[in-house]
Image (spheres, helix red, strand yellow):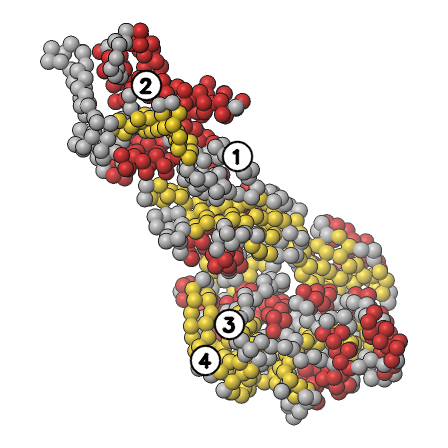
Amino acid sequence: MEKRTTIGILAHVDAGKTTLAEAMLYRCGAIRKAGRVDHGDAHMDTHSLERARGITIFASQAQLQLGDWKAALLDTPGHVDFSAEMERTLWVLDYAILVINGADGVQAHVRTLWKLLRQYRIPVFLFVNKMDQPGTDRAALLAELKDALDGRCVDFTADRARTDIWEDVAVCDEALLEKFLEEGTLSAESIAHQIKKRQLYPCYFGSALKDEGVQEFLDDMARYMEQPMYPAEFGARVYKIGRDEQGNRLSYLKVTGGSLKVKQLIRGETDGESWEEKADQIRLYSGGSFEAVQEAPAGTVCAVTGLSRTWAGEGMGMEGRGPVPALEPVLTYQLLPPDGCNLQELLQKLRRLEEELPELHVVWQEELSEIHVRVMGEVQIEILKSLIQERFGVPVEFGAGSIVYKETIENVVEGVGHFEPLRHYAEVHLLLEPGERGSGLVFESRCSEDVLDRNWQRLILTHLAERSHPGVLTGSEITDMKISLVAGRAHAKHTEGGDFRQATYRAVRQGLKQAKSVLLEPFYEFRLTIPADKLGRAMTDIQKMTGTFSEPENENGQMVLKGSAPVSQMQGYAAEVTAYTRGLGHLSCALKGYGPCANADEVIAAMGYDSEADILNPTGSVFCAHGAGFYVPWNQVFSYMQVDGVLRPKKEPKEAGLETARRSQSSLGAVDPKELDAIFERTYGPIRRDRQGVGRVERSFRKEPEDTGKREIKLRKKEKEYLLVDGYNIIFAWEDLKALSEINMEAARGKLMDILSNLQGALGCTLILVFDAYRVEGGTREIFKYHNIHVVYTKEAETADQYIEKTVHELGRKYQVTVATSDGLEQVIIMGQGASRLSASGLRELVEVTGSELRETMEQKPAGGKNYLFENLSDEVRGWIEEILSAEE
């Protein structure tokens, strides 16, 4: 079986990385002559901009035979401004070659590369280049590598005795040490295994330009690599999108399982939409040329045509979504097109360019009619200008740059998102926890499949990862957080995938509104070399920048300051260093990461972001009532949610509906009956007070012809009358019951039941008292008779409003039904179902009037027979009761 591997070559700019790649290709017979960067004929630098500037801008690929290995060599950019392009290649590497400039040692960007290699768990071979230059010291450089990178860096240079190498290798691992002490030797397989596990880092010293040490380096790489194991199932990882000279779109990918054949159907997902396309052509690139093949087995890095919707980082087949890039631009610039340029056409062209350079984050600001892009630095700006001119024929400029901020949180919160317009349903609960600096966003599910099916859980996690989420301070992207799915609910018939996308996004935003947010700004890790007499000036400058630094070091008569400072403060400082040191000073910077912003209040005020006005990223949720969705602000969502939250206390049985009752009561007295009528008319049309219907009470109030002012009461008797009472709504509306409930809720419920029993005895109707218990986990509906009234505790996930609405719908067409509640929304629904409404205050007045009359009537009650209060009331009292009832309608 042919052994395949993918090797990436990385370095800080000017370390001689491309020169080493050319020497490797030449030594392996892939090219006849090694090119040179300064001559503009390097085999791996194929773009005109690369040849003109003498730097690698785009990652390129070459094929070489390394011993019995068939290897794909990926050359990556070394300049900091193009480090995002470099990072994308790490997604598909089996091994990496880290090139160190022997004249400069370990620089800031080298440390960044080392951190990335550790993050992606990539085994590393080190090649210390330019050892032919005067002043280079191999022993000192090896000591620096051990100190700055890893103590397991071992000198493997060929002029050392093999036994010496084995001794240094053996001390990196206890098992190897025991084996070496027993046998006096180490096998190539055991060394290769240690390298693969990142327990050993072989170091080689030489000169790529003079072809010194290159062959020994290649021989050892072939000896000390392990064959990756690939599954039989098809999988692939896209790491780059490009275009050939004819404009054909190329998807650069590595086959990570099975094989890829020409015309094979490939499935993927872009922006939540699934797609299926054919691989028209499979190309193996080597520099600017390629070989078309019919099949690419696992381990092959190739470019595929015919795929129009792929994106960098996409996983195909068995592969999941790619990792979130660690290196991103920290500066954003306004793009300035020429006069008369069609901005929308230019925007679409830039979108195509963004496929190849996703770090650009092209943004169209509608309100300002401006295009903004993100870049890593000034060199990338110059390349972009040339690239846009070359590709699209549009000369552009860039405005002043500004910092790309981010946001995180300091405390743990639970975010709730609910999306329930008509015939849609989804609810999502997310736990938002602060993470370590630089950790990015981490997603997981802690939700039981008994609560939410696995497929819905996976969909929610996909929606969390598919986009960046804006914070609530400045609208900047959030980071350094762990977001866990803890609960959710779907509907068997009405839930669609898009419902969970909406609920997920809203849950994140609702959680951020509750949390204590922190504004983050990017920091540079710097190395400042200056003459000794300028040290005081440099230290003062760094302190003014709110930066930090370690104790100054003396290197060959120059002072070195190492530390970190905000990017916003260090912009333009390199030129300032050159000026005040008369060209003797040097500043090198690498992105360290994000930290708290020192002037956060000032930045937030200047950006003027209003999270509530951001209609594209709502913080509230959508709920449904009577067939129509309505928006609930973020700070009221917990009162409406239908799933228990993990950070909210569980409700005890029969106490579970209290919060809903309080929420209903919050609008008590604030709802004008005229306003309710207006809402009803907008929804259902004009209200007809005298409309006919079986079982309707018909009341008329008119003056006598003589205009005496007396009221004539005309009642049409019904076969049966019902009074439904929203229990907790009434308890919290009546001051005496509310005060009692704060001491003992059971006593408040008992007193209300006694009061309503007396009222039922006076009115002779069927009285149903309903209590919310919809938060009782696993609860079933409970109905029992208390004296002469019926008491209902609703089941899990059923509110009192829902039970009452359903009951009114069933009874309202046959019987007279009145509902006692002061929930404004419920009153509108009641009117739509054809029932009468009675407010909490109206019910209280009715209780007082009937109670007084009941005492008088009972004293005069004749022996035997039924004697309902309504049939024995005086005309005056009957008028009072009718007035109360009619006023509520």
What residue sits 54% from the left and 22% below the top?
A: 743
Q: Which residue is mark 2?
A: 761
Q: Residue 641, position in %: x, y?
A: 46, 42
Q: Is residue 520 left or right of residue 279?
A: right
Q: Which residue is mark 3?
A: 317
Judged from the image, the secondary structure of the residue bearing numbered disc 2 is: helix
Q: Which residue is mark 1?
A: 652
Q: Amino acid at mark 4?
A: Gln
Mark 4 and mark 3 lie on one chain; the one further toward the N terminus is 4
Q: In front: 463, or 138? A: 463
Mark 3 and mark 1 lie on one chain; the one further toward the N terminus is 3
Mark 3 and mark 2 lie on one chain; the one further toward the N terminus is 3
Q: Amino acid at mark 2?
A: Gly
Mark number displayed over residue 264? 4
Q: Nearer the viewer, mark 2 or mark 4?
A: 2
Mark 1 and mark 4 lie on one chain; the one further toward the N terminus is 4
Q: In front: 535, or 435? A: 435
Q: Quadrant of residue 107?
A: bottom right
Inspect this view and state whether residue 181 appears: yes
How far apart marks 4 and 3 lie (CA) works out to 12 Å
Q: Amino acid at mark 1?
A: Glu
Which part of the image, by quadrant, shows the N terminus? bottom right
How far apart marks 2 and 4 lie (CA) works out to 80 Å
Judged from the image, the secondary structure of the residue bearing numbered disc 4 is: loop
How far apart marks 1 and 2 lie (CA) works out to 32 Å
Q: In front: 225, or 105? A: 225
How far apart marks 3 and 2 lie (CA) works out to 72 Å
Q: Nearer the viewer, mark 3 or mark 1?
A: 1
Judged from the image, the secondary structure of the residue bearing numbered disc 1 is: loop
Q: Nearer the viewer, mark 1 or mark 2?
A: 2
Mark 1 nearby-residue class (10 Å; few <14, some 14–19, many ≥20): few
Q: Amino acid at mark 3?
A: Gly
